Amino acid sequence: MAANSQLPRRIIKETQRLLSEPAPGISASPSEDNLRYFNVMILGPTQSPYEGGVYKLELFLPEEYPMAAPKVRFLTKIYHPNIDKLGRICLDILKDKWSPALQIRTVLLSIQALLSAPNPDDPLAEDIAKQWKEDEAKAVATAKEWTRQYAQG
Amino acid sequence: MNSDDDYYSDNDYDGSVGSDDESGSEDDYGFDLTTVEEDGTRRPPYTVLSEEDILSEQREAIDGVVSVLSVDTSTATTLLRFFKWSVSRLHDDWFQDEARVRAKVGLPPSSSNEGVAKASTTCQICFDEYAPDKLRSASCGHFFCQECWQGYLKTGINDGPGCLSMRCPLPDCNSLVPETLIEELVEADELAKYKRFHLRSYVEDNHKVKWCPAPGCCFAVELKSAVPAANEPLDIGCKCGTSFCWSCDQEAHRPVDCETVKKWVLKNSAESENMNWILANSKPCPKCKRPIEKNQGCMHMTCTPPCRFEFCWLCLAPWSEHGERTGGFYSCNRYDANKNAGEYDETEKRRENARNSLERYMHYYERWAAHEKARVKAQEDLKEMSDDKLKRLSECQSTPVSQLKFVTDAWTQIVECRRVIKWTYGYGFYAELSQDRRNFFEFMQGEAELSLDNLHRAAELELAPFLSLDTTPTSSPVPAGLAASPSTASYATSPAGSVSSLYGTTAAFDDFRSKLTGLTAITKHFFDTLVCQLEKGLDSSDNTQVIEAMVRSKTSEKWKI
Ligand SMILES: [Zn+2]
Ligand SMILES: [Zn+2]
Ligand SMILES: [Zn+2]
Ligand SMILES: [Zn+2]
Ligand SMILES: [Zn+2]
Ligand SMILES: [Zn+2]
């Protein structure tokens, strides 16, 4: 592919490493027709309400990458205060805290960590965050229910 | 100046009023905007800075830090920006604990030599390996290749003013990117943007400097005195012609405090629908009932011939009652709630109260709005005067422009006074004053307003004939072309023949000069008094003296029209 032939060396190296030494609980592989588009899978971390779930995400490296952050989105429905119903993620390193010295791998590890430690004080999904703060046990139960319903297909 | 002396003979004038006007000091804003120090010396409380001024002040501050702290320019710049351009705070902290300041700001320790790579290394952004001379670091030893740095810096600069404190790209490394690296690697376009943010930081981060809020104005203002307390007004006159309040960015409003102005502006916008009719341009003549359009600044109206009734635009009373003061003080400015007093039952009383509160507001609002309109008009007239009419006047009167400064002085004074008098109505509406103080305030306000109207009228009407080369008396009492148009009806003032025969003669112009100069001086005097007394909180101990002085300076003059 013409577009892919100009793929920066950095992306090629990152891709090779993602495939050869995947991080535990994470897989990411480039799409065949666009090497800047990745199909991602993250396993719900143990001892989190998402345990046992398999979450699909898409990750895209914009033209400016690595000067600009990758664009990442959940495709699997998830009940989480920092992830909205379109799957968009509220994570500082995807916004103002992005640095070109970060990588796809670090981004995905951060997302996995976010599943272990939801942060209702910096919410993206207001209603879920509210539920989380008012009655955490109930919120966790709902998250587990969603995991069963949507992430175990 | 010959006849001017009459105006200054009175002891109540401090000599500077007259001499200032004559010598034409450069910083004449028509009002006293200087701060008076304890020892009586006056100095302007601020300076207006152009971009070049900002740059040179910045450079001066940086050079100062370079020599005092023995650091390079880039470090000095970084430090000053971090300390919001406060040299004294920087000095204090630096000499107390240099290492702490370095760490906090993100500067390398003074002994550091981590900027230069010693061996080939892999760039942590592009993963390629580079020779030492192709690698750069923010003095922290985290090396990236030049090309990756360029991308990083460019992105940062395009992100906004945050680029003034860009850090090493490595997450969690606090090292500040030195300015030298930016200058070395960034392209001209981005560098210009960066320099622009740097310039703006001197204004935007510095609590003693701010931009003029006028749209499109590029000047900044730097305070030379202490920053005023919240709610305390400080009028700033920008070189662009705008005057604004340092504390609240609203239009200048000294001596009224910011809170009152905010409340008043808010109230006006809430009531604007009800009040629109007050802004009407025409009112029926109180005598002949024909509509009279107001197209001039001063409130002294004259109906069209044959009526020629002279009345006050604001209260519609005959002007003679304002000018001659039959009995009591000039009272157009006071709101009299008892006008409609009578016998009422409770319901009627309540209804009356409600009506009174609206009427009371209307009283103040109408005057506020009329003075604002007059101010805008006077500002336009002043501009026209300086742009064009002054040259014409100079030709018609064979007088060099340099000797016509009294005309622009008069107009400048009018503009400033219209603004002050306007805000005193916002003040009058909200101020909770004892009856004594209110009387005192309204006396000064009334006298100031009346003198301003006299000055304004003289500048509007009596100057016009001197702008014409035609010195022969007109046969018609009304200049041709004026009478036909209702919109200029108010210009048909006195039977013109008696005066116009003198137009063009040196004596008549000299008379006009002394009259206008005198009116300007007394108006300035009255307004200075008003402003000063309001700022002193209408302290009742010297009220009687102030009133007596004002009356004396008035009665000793022939300044009435
Ligand atoms: Zn590189
Ligand atoms: Zn670093
Ligand atoms: Zn300005
Ligand atoms: Zn203010
Ligand atoms: Zn009339
Ligand atoms: Zn009146």
Image (spheres, helix red, strand yellow):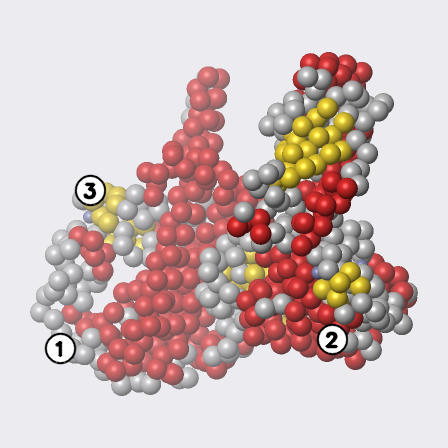
User: Rounded to the nearest whole Å, what is the CA distance between mark 1 and mark 3?
Assistant: 35 Å
Q: Which mark is residue B73?
A: 2
- The relative height of residue A92 versus residue B62 in the rendered view (above or below) is above
Kindly indicate whether the residue at mark 3 contacts the one at mark 2 (C-beta within 8 angstroms). no
Q: How crowded is the residue under tag 1: few (<14 C-alpha within 10 Å), some, or many (20+)?
A: few
In the image, what residue type sits under mark 2? Thr
Work out whether mark 2 precedes mark 3 in sequence or the reverse, and give the earlier one.
2
The quadrant holding residue B105 is bottom right
Q: How many marks?
A: 3
A132 displayed left or right of B378: right
What subunit carries mark 1? Answer: B
Residue under the image location 38 percent in, 34 percent down: B273
Tell if the residue under mark 1 belongs to the same chain as the one under mark 3: yes
What subunit carries mark 3? Answer: B
State the SS at label 3: loop
Question: Cβ(mark 3) to ligand 5 < 8 Å?
Answer: yes
Position of residue B340 measured from the top left corner of the image (x, y, whole percent): 40, 31
A13 displayed left or right of B318: right
Position of residue B113 measured from the top left corner of the image (x, y, whole percent): 85, 71
- Outermost residue, left side: B475
Residue under the image location 31 percent in, 85 percent down: B399
Position of residue B243 measured from the top left corner of the image (x, y, whole percent): 50, 60
Q: Which mark is residue B289?
A: 3
Where the C terminus of chain A falls, by quadrant?
top right
Residue under the image location 45 percent in, 39 percent down: B269
Residue that carries the numbered disc 1 in the rendered image: B472
